[in-house]
Amino acid sequence: MSRLAVSAADELADESASDWEDAAEEVFPELYPCPGEECKKTGKLQRVNKNGRMRKHKTDKRDVLPCTGSGAPILTARIPRRSKSGFYKDPATGVLLRSVTTILNQGSAHEALVYWAAKVTAETAMDNVIDMLAASRTEEGREQFIRWLKQEPNRRKDERADVGKAVHKLVECRILGEPAPVRLLANEELRPYIFHFNRWVTEWEIDFEASEMVVANYDEPYGGTLDYLFRSVPLARKLGVPEDTIFPGDTKGLALDTPLPTPTGWTTMKDVQVGDTLFDSDGRPCTVTEVSEVHYRDCYRVTFDDGSSVICDDEHLWWTESGHPQWKKFGVHSTVEVAATLKAYGKTHHRVPVAEPLNIPQAALRIEPYVLGCWLGDGKHTSGEISSQDQEIFDNIEACGYTVGPQQKLSRPGGCPVRTVLGLVLDLRVLDLFGNKHIPATYLRSSKEQRLALLQGLMDTDGTWNKRRKCAQIVSASKEFASSIRELLLSLGQRVVMFEMNHTGFKAGKHYLVTFTPRGINPFRLTRKAELVNVPSTTRASRRMIVSVEQTLTVPTKCIAVNSPNRTYLCGKEMIPTHNTGGTLNGTTYDGSVHGVYAEAGLQMAAYRMAPWGWERDGTRIKLPPRHDVGVILHLRPEGYNLYPARCGDDMYEIFQTIRKVAEFNTGLAKNVIGEPLTLADDDPTDEIKEEAA
């Protein structure tokens, strides 16, 4: 495929879905199956193979007949297959080869997955605390609830639309020259992934050598299935290696970005460019002055007491308030320094200040923010009606320049009064809010006063003040809407926590609780609620405490420099202040925020690289040529792709060998470390004492 094809494909971005599909079929014809005929038995469309023959009826369960690029069927009878016990069995010799993924699962902590599984399990327990207490009354109920709770991570995985796996299937089809499955091409969500995968193949002149090949190392022994092997002249030149070098590759379809707030919305660490505008810890706009290349260092997960976390490298700098007696009250410390002094006198003490409100000019908004907040809270989604028991709310709306109609007749005695804000419907339609309640992006990046007015409208109608916990709360049945409220609060300099919970009674189901202790603002305009606000004198609302710093696998890192006075910028959805680079970006000293947690792919590729044997598609075992010690991870996104180098050389293979030994211990020797309980010997003197006493 020529580069001209990619240029033509680039022009498709603005086309409609149907136009895109038609044009993509012309640009990438190998992805689309050839015409077929209707099956007389089932009435379903049958596909025609490359020889013009109809498929046999017994293969109708599949979208396409698996074949190689030449059209020959794939024979898999003699290729080792992974069993449920985690072994590949060589069909010719009977040798058992432990799976590489099984070794990594049994021998490494999978820090990222363990953290995620623990987090969702804890969240589920809290969301179902009433059911948990009820079940704990009996032993049987307790055991049933524990079993159900332990399966929550698996349920979460099953619920996800696994775009990564679907994209991987499309990758295989492209590599093998197969037509893409019809069911995937019909999926609108996958169309951009197909598009950008083919862009990568063309732009980097990819020449695939193998796909989904089973490989083995008989000396260790272990086996596994690598994603693909390929040659790429541009990549070889980029890395300074011979042009015929064979590279291992892996494809990922999940987000790798560290989000960065901007005055117009969000960007990412990988997409940020010199000249872009970000925010510093004081909420002031700052400009990106330098951006480094992607590089690799030892990495850590820094976790805060509100549950948020950031992955960063060992030299990344944090601007913290510390109780350590040898440091100033505020100081800049590397991740390694924070890890080494995580606790003082047995308590965590490194505090990162919560960012101040974002300093943004006033925006031209079609609907007054307070009025929009009231409608979002208690308005009818298909009209300008707002229901409220408080006349003061309607007075506040009129104070914003609106006319409020008379109270409508109550549908039932004791019902909530309903009044119409005249002229509101037209503005709702213009902003695409009619029948589609959400907070428009322009309101989330308006001035502080406008954002506060929006918040007060929401809180006056839907918010509450928790007297016992001395915090403000608002609940929504929509996770997306609750997340927007959370972003609104973060932009106002608040420390926010969002919980998922099961709501009973009216509108039962999953709901999302957003809670915060007001800092520098009163979130209510309604008098009866505003007077309840009684914020204690505490610093908790103005900082995040670092509670753990745990080393994780090396991941691609990138750093930026900004011109803010205190050399900080905000990163992550939580808008956490982090420090500017402490060295020269083009020199030898680096630090910066991290994007991506796919380093285990490097361990897998290192193991596959040291596996000298592989199986062809017809079941023939072959000796594999040497492969390069740098592989690549292709990250596909709906809006594009990124190609990351991944170390898979001898150093990574040594780590894999260590993990393999740990796995052997966990599954073998560990069972024999602890013996049977000790008892007194038969001739122990105490036996005679016992007999005399008798």
Image (tube, grey):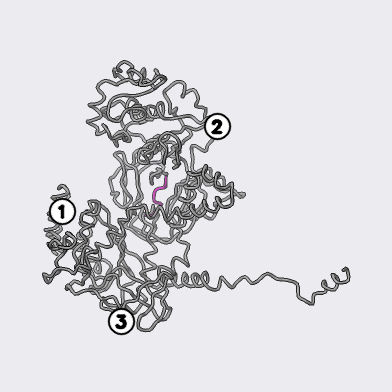
Does the image show residue 580?
A: yes
Is residue 578 located in the magenta-colored stretch of the structure?
A: yes
Q: Position of residue 211 (x, y in %)?
A: 27, 70
Q: Quadrant of the N terminus?
A: bottom left
Q: Position of residue 151 (x, y in %)?
A: 46, 55
Give the mark toward the camera: 1 or 3: 1
Q: Quadrant of the C terminus?
A: bottom right
Under circle 3, the secondary element is strand
Marks 1/2: CA distance?
Answer: 57 Å
Q: Which image quarter: residue 657? A: bottom left
Q: Which image quarter: residue 143? A: bottom right
Residue 329, above or below 602: above
Number of other residues with Cα within 10 Å of mark 3, as a class: few under 14, some 14 to 19, many 20 or more:
few
Marks 1/3: CA distance?
Answer: 41 Å
- Residue tagged 3: 623
Side of 432 where 480 appears, left or right: right
Q: Give amino acid for label 1.
A: Glu
Magenta span dominant secondary structure: loop
Does the image show residue 233?
A: no
**First to last magenta residue range:** 577-584
Side of 345 where 173 appears, left or right: left
- Residue tagged 1: 21
Under circle 1, the secondary element is helix
- Residue tagged 2: 468
Q: Position of residue 609 (x, y in %)?
A: 35, 74
Marks 2/3: CA distance?
Answer: 71 Å
Q: Give amino acid for label 2.
A: Arg
